[in-house]
């Protein structure tokens, strides 16, 4: 049997290392992906696609050079590596380098003023001197940030800002004349100006005073500032937006498909203020349905190069904190002109489909439209219609705060669309899509934004109905451009396959709860992940397993090179449906219209850069959202310090046990030194801590009773006291 046949479909374990080995051994030659595949002895399309992606990634990291389109050669600076510095809270860092078997350790002495998240070049020491790979930062290629949030400590002639971020290993020195109005103990934003060669700390100035630590507004503004996110718009941007012509004009209608007479409605959360998508429905003469996905035409108002566009691009996304939304666009657009409010005509960009009763798409049309929304529903109201098939909406779920009747046409439309959505979802699941119905933690807030209760938001059929039609529009727009004969620059939402190592770790973890994973091939992986997510529904370990499963997935990102979307099992996917809150969707609208108009392909390099920026801003926004939830959880637990809570052990480390409270999903740490009655050692293999004398063990997944020891708002951290195992306490 030939080696090619033997290896067909079998991907090398470490593809990066295999590719680099080939290029190193033939350092004077250039290779394309087909030649690499031949050297590796593989010839299946799936592995070839992996090789194409990996070559692009290695070139982006400067580990190989792209000497011509699709042709690569080794970058021969062998002892120097580039990457993003990942700091620990203990003051040392690591650089992750694909082709090395382990991360490169960087001691505090060898950081040379580099901070967490900086793009750096490092020199790798001779590894014989040490058991682990160790390096030194030789260049800071790009600072991740120069602004930090912290507490000002004033001395007589100067001050220091002690930074909130635990991964920041130094405080920042501020001269007296650069302190401004800040007072001792204030939470501030400080900007680093320089780090003089012989100085122990970098020098900076106070850029903004956020307020008194621990106060609600101070802490929320602190979270935004920590990630460099704004909380208001510059005056000139607001002025520009307020002067836009937002009236619906006859001359503009004449350039669009007029769909104002077609039944159209929105379904959104009850507390939504902007409605950027609507659905239309009508039955065609042939018995098929015409279903339109209508999206606010943001690109009609936000034109390339104006200050509104510049601001939207910089923000790249709306940020959803627990108590507020920081919008990407000013209110005149986000809540008015581009919000598809009921009984109003709006400019829209639409994907219109002819679909048969088996959920097969027979025809599609994309273009600019003008629509009229006949009604607005909350998810709860639409769910009531689905469940009862009745037109009466009771007062207790009505967003109108009164009982009312829905037009029978709408009841029919929602019912038929739900049947189609179910069928589309079923097909996706069979094709290997992964069903993440993660429980969302939400808070009931009083007028002062104090959390007075916690509740969980789950997805029902009404949510899934909207989700399926948005997925359909996103997929079909991406296919329409991606499948054209000549390649067109476009923006894809990309999601790579999960990391094998992380999947193995997940398998080991869930085994502790009696679950198993089949990691044999792609289909068995997605099937067993779906079974796992279904099996944990309503169980004590659900939130932990949901979270851990999401962490095994690669991060989705925006890119001009389409690699498909693993989690959704789509070969082509983009973001078309939320231009009010996502800048990539605005760019997708512009590019789609450009190609509908028959224009040439846009500049790929320019859009690649914009994709990278959008992905980065999305990550910052997600981190800020998580921090705001953690802040609210800590705030909520401050008022419950005398209570006992039942929790599940969600993590075990060498310094302590993490416990997640079942009734509110708040997570806190019990330090090993605080465990009474014995000295406990960490048993890494069994995800447990074990008492030396008693042999008593606390293991991942155990149910335990805890109480709050300390709730630190500024660090957004909870410490718990251990009361005991559930069985002991309840005995």
Image (cartoon, rainbow, N blue to C red):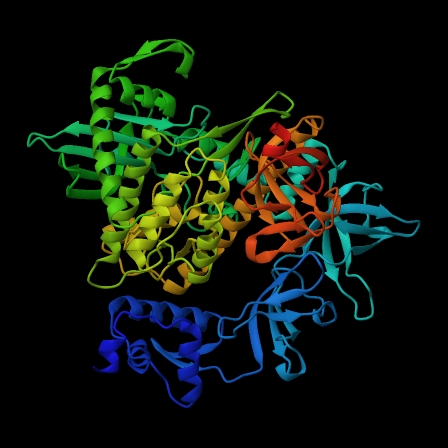
Residue 313 in sight here: no
Quadrant assignment for the C terminus: top right
Q: Is residue 319 left or right of residue 368?
A: right
Q: Nearer the viewer, residue 613 or 521?
A: 521
Q: How many marks?
A: 0
Across and down, in percent, residue 171 comes to 78, 55
Q: Nearer the viewer, residue 204 or 118?
A: 118
As drawn, the residue found furthest toward the right would be: 156
Across and down, in percent, residue 280 comes to 24, 30
Q: Is residue 258 left or right of residue 175?
A: left
As drawn, the residue found furthest toward the front would be: 694
Across and down, in percent, residue 390 comes to 25, 14
Query: Is 322 above or below relative to 309?
Result: above
Q: Nearer the viewer, residue 498 or 293?
A: 498
Across and down, in percent, residue 345 comes to 31, 26
Q: Is residue 115 left or right of residue 428?
A: right
Q: Residue at x 13, y 36 (%)?
A: 356
Quadrant assignment for the N terminus: bottom left
């Amino acid at each position: 049997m030939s080696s090619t046949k033997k290896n067909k479909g079998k991907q090398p374990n470490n593809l990066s290392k295999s590719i680099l080995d080939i290029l190193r051994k033939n350092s004077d030659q250039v290779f394309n992906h087909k030649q690499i595949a031949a050297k590796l002895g593989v010839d299946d399309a799936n592995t070839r696609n992996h090789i194409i992606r990996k070559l692009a990634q290695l070139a982006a990291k400067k580990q190989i050079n792209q000497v011509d389109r699709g042709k690569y050669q080794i970058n021969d600076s062998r002892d120097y590596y580039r990457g993003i510095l990942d700091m620990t809270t203990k003051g040392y860092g690591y650089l992750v380098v694909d082709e090395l078997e382990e991360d490169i350790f960087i001691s505090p002495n060898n950081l040379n003023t580099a901070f967490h998240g900086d793009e750096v070049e490092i020199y790798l020491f001779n590894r014989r001197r040490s058991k682990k790979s160790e390096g030194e930062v030789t260049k800071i290629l790009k600072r991740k940030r120069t602004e930090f949030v912290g507490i000002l400590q004033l001395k007589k002639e100067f001050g220091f800002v002690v930074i909130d971020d635990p991964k920041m290993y130094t405080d920042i020195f501020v001269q007296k004349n650069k302190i401004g109005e800040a007072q001792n103990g204030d939470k501030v934003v400080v900007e680093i100006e320089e780090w003089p060669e012989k100085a122990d700390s970098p020098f900076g100035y106070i850029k903004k005073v956020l307020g008194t630590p621990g106060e609600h507004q101070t802490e929320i503004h602190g979270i935004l500032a920590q990630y460099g996110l704004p909380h208001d718009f510059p005056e000139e941007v607001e002025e520009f937006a307020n002067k836009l012509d937002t009236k619906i004009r006859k001359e503009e209608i004449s350039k669009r498909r007029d769909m104002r007479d077609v039944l159209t409605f929105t379904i959104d959360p009850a507390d939504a203020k902007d409605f950027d998508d609507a659905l239309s429905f009508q039955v065609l003469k042939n018995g098929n349905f015409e279903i339109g996905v209508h999206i606010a035409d943001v690109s009609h108002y936000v034109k390339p190069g104006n200050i509104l566009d510049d601001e939207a691009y910089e923000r790249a996304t709306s940020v959803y904190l627990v108590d507020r939304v920081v919008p990407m666009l000013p209110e005149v657009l986000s809540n008015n002109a581009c919000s598809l409010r009921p009984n109003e005509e709006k400019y829209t960009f639409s994907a219109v489909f002819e679909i048969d009763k088996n959920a097969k798409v027979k025809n599609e049309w994309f273009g600019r439209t003008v629509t009229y929304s006949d009604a607005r529903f909350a998810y709860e109201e639409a769910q009531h219609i689905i469940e009862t098939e009745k037109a009466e909406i009771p007062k207790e779920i009505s967003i109108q705060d009164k009982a009312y009747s829905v037009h029978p046409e709408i009841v029919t439309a929602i019912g038929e669309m739900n049947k189609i959505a179910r069928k589309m979802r079923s097909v996706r699941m069979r094709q290997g899509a992964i069903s993440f119905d993660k429980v969302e933690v939400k808070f009931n807030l009083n007028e002062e934004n104090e959390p007075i209760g916690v509740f969980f938001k789950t997805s029902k059929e009404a949510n899934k109905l909207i989700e399926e039609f948005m997925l359909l529009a996103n997929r079909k727009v991406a296919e329409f451009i991606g499948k054209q004969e000549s390649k067109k620059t476009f923006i894809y939402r990309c999601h790579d396959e999960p990391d094998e190592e992380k999947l193995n770790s997940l398998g080991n973890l869930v085994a502790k709860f009696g679950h198993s994973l089949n990691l044999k091939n792609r289909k068995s992986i997605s099937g067993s992940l779906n079974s796992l997510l279904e099996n944990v529904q309503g169980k004590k370990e659900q939130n932990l397993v949901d979270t851990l499963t999401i962490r095994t997935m690669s991060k989705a990102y925006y890119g001009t090179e389409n690699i498909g979307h693993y989690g959704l099992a789509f070969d082509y996917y983009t973001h078309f449906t939320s231009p009010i809150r996502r800048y990539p969707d605005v760019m997708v609208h512009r590019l789609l219209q450009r190609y509908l108009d028959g224009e040439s392909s846009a500049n790929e390099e320019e859009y690649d850069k914009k994709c990278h920026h959008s992905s980065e801003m999305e990550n910052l926004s997600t981190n800020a959202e998580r921090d705001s939830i953690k802040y609210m959880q800590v705030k909520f637990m401050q008022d419950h310090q005398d209570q006992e809570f039942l929790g599940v052990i969600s993590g075990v480390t060498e310094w302590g046990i993490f416990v997640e409270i079942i009734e509110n999903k708040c997570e806190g740490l019990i330090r090993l030194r605080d465990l009474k009655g014995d000295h406990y050692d960490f048993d890494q293999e069994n995800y447990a801590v074990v008492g030396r004398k008693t042999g008593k063990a606390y293991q991942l997944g155990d149910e335990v009773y805890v109480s709050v020891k300390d709730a630190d708002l500024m660090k957004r951290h909870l410490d718990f006291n251990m009361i005991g195992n559930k069985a002991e306490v309840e005995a």
